[in-house]
Image (cartoon, rainbow, N blue to C red):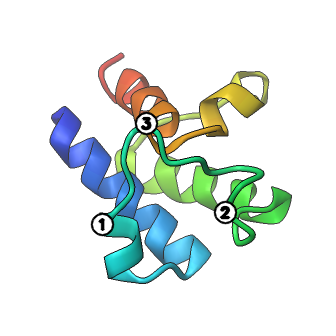
Amino acid sequence: MGEAEVEATVRAVLRDVLAISDERIAGFTDDTPLFGALPEFDSLAVAGVLTELEDRLGILIEDDEVDGEMLATFGALTRFASERVLM
């Protein structure tokens, strides 16, 4: 799976879990803030997003890997997911 596919998957997961419109999620850039900035992306939603990423990308995310930095922006979350897929 390439980086473009990972990015598309991250967009789809955020859209589905957070119930964000296609138009809104399409406007996300690497710098778009997520956790703490989107009211939909609360601590409960984090668990849903991570679970969906694991399922759709076939990766395992350990609890000790989850921190505010990897959830801070769309780009950070996408890079984190890409790194897991390419491992």
Residue 79 visible in the displayed image: yes
Residue highlighted by disc 1: 26
In the rendered image of this protein, does residue 65 appear above or below residue 27? above
Choose the circle earlier in sequence order: 3 or 2.
2
In the rendered image of this protein, does residue 50 appear above or below residue 15? above
Quarter of the image where the C terminus is located: top left
Residue highlighted by disc 2: 48
Q: Residue at x 45, y 64 (%)?
A: 13
Q: Residues within 10 Å of mark 3 (few under 14, many from 20)?
A: many
Q: Which mark is residue 75?
A: 3
Horizontal arrangement in the rendering, residue 51 relative to residue 66 (left or right): left
Q: Residues within 10 Å of mark 2 (few under 14, many from 20)?
A: some
Residue 66 visible in the displayed image: no
Q: Residue at x 53, y 59 (%)?
A: 52
Q: Are marks 1 and 3 in contact (CB under 8 Å)?
A: no
Give the alpha-carbon distance from disc 2 to disc 1, as whole Å.
Answer: 20 Å
Across and down, in percent, residue 75 comes to 43, 36
In terms of depth relative to the viewer, which is nearer, 41 or 52? Answer: 41
Give the alpha-carbon distance from disc 3 to disc 2, as whole Å.
Answer: 18 Å
The residue under label 3 is which amino acid type? Answer: Gly
Choose the circle earlier in sequence order: 1 or 3.
1
**Circle 2: element type:** helix
The residue under label 2 is which amino acid type? Answer: Gly
Depth check, mark 3 against mark 2: the one in front is 3
